[in-house]
Amino acid sequence: MQILMARSIALVFICGLAVPLNAQTPAPAATVFQNVRIFDGKVGQLSGPSHVLIRGNKIERIAATPIATDRSADTVLIEGSGRTLMPGLIDMHWHTTLVRPTAAQALSADVGFTTLVAGAEATDTLMRGFTTVRDMGGPAFGLKRAIDEGVLPGPRIFPSGALLTVTGGHGDFRQRFEVPRIEGMPLARMEQLGASIVTDSPDEVRRRAREQMMQGASQIKLTASGGVASPHSPIDVVTFTEGELRAAVKVAGDWGTYVAAHAYTPASMQRAIRAGAKCIEHGQLMDEATAKLMAEKGVWLSIQPFPEGFEQLLPPGSVEREKMLEVMTGTDRAYRLAKQYHVKTAFGTDIIFSPEWAKRQGSLLVSLTKWYTPAEALAMATGTNAELLAMSGKRNPYPGKLGVIEEGALADLLLVDGNPIEDIKLIEDPAKNFVVIMKDGKTYKNTLPK
Ligand SMILES: [Zn+2]
């Protein structure tokens, strides 16, 4: 027995398990934010002076008068001094594992390296005030688990797993010499990684969609049109057949969730909507008829503001950069149509292959003020985005209300040094202006004087 114990202790040290597994500070029993003004994720103005009690991982009480606590040692008081308390930000189009590496690294590096880089990025994402991301394709299941189990700090992740594509579709990163594909051939690199997977029939779509659900996907992501960053996939191409799309929609529906379809053009958007997709990713090249159809059917538009210079994510002179510029020309019109027809619109960034742009995640939100008031932009990135997250139904990995400050909601909160409705540019400098960052009731950052 003793030998056995000695052996297992040795094993613990060899494997490095002696390092505390929980890298987070344990949550206090209660935290009280005193004297804050609240942006609740819905209403376009701040509340009067308020006090907010967090117990466990939820917002228990919001009051206009000081909240009496039992003052036990594990109650933390945070003096807000009139600062703004707002919900944590949500990015609806994120690729946790593709943000930092270059495209070449993503396809050539070993999984361990890729995952560790993604972990470091996840911590930075949280420190930028993004407490939730919806992962729109990539091997995010392990990272999500590690974050949820407290191995490292990071945002909540709503994972799609591998995105589904077709031969030559967006996300098919194979080289020309890798076709023709014969039944029984080994999977391509991107498929082995769980980044994207080629599916060329309703049967294959069903199997691959179910594989993502089995691993814990909260929604299915597929690419219904060509895309920017893929080598063999012109933007104008409509990829999946309606039958294939319906197969994915059926699987997602059977699991109580939905399909989010990447699509830029009216033809691809309309086919995906006809097949039952509940959310269109991108949509920058949509036309009036498609905007009307989306409004009529209550389909979400998860669009990104792609600011000037965003094409620099892609190599100079490349076809990919040309495609990005083509898509970017449609951004302004798409936002205007979405507003005109009251299409349900979500905010995301789709930053990939660039740690520099990742630092500007909040700036992309600020750039929405080209079309929306600051309060509307902030509400989109919090309360509205959370409505789309809730479409995952029972596959929602974090049951509870996100994106709002109300009693009973999950405690994902930012304390902002200033009023972001009056000065939304505060969001651009999270290191300076987000003085407290809380996720799930735990404080990950507090720079207020003790
Ligand atoms: Zn994307």
Image (tube, rainbow, N blue to C red):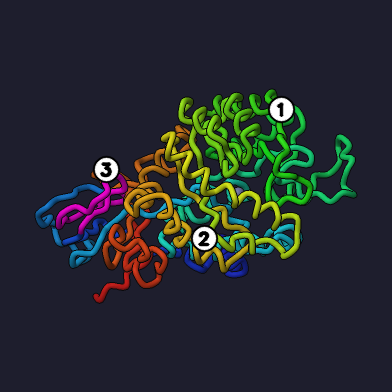
The reply to whether residue 3 is visible in this rendering is: no
Secondary structure of the residue carrying tag 2 is helix
Provide the residue designation for mark 1: 241
Residue 391 is inside the magenta segment: no
Q: Is residue 370 left or right of residue 140?
A: left
- Residue 408: image tag: 3
| SS under mark 1 | loop
Between disc 2 and disc 1, the foreground one is: 1
Q: Secondary structure at mark 3?
A: loop
The Cα atoms of the two marked residues, 1 and 3, are separated by: 43 Å
Q: Earlier in the sequence, mark 2 or mark 1?
A: 2
Range shown magenta: 37-58
User: Is the N terminus in the top left, top right, bottom left or bottom right quadrant?
Assistant: bottom right
Mark 3 Cα shell of 10 Å, populated few (<14), some (14-19), many (≥20): some
Q: Quadrant of residue 30?
A: bottom left
Residue at (68, 39) in percent of width and height: 225
- Report the amino acid beneath label 2: Ala
Relative image position of residue 121 (x, y in whole percent): 54, 63
Observer-nearest residue: 115 or 253? 253
Hey, what amino acid is under mark 3?
Gly
Of labels 1 and 3, earlier in sequence is 1
Q: Which residue in the protein does label 2 denote? A: 122
Amino acid type, residue under disc 1 in the picture: Thr
Q: Position of residue 112 (x, y in %)?
A: 67, 61
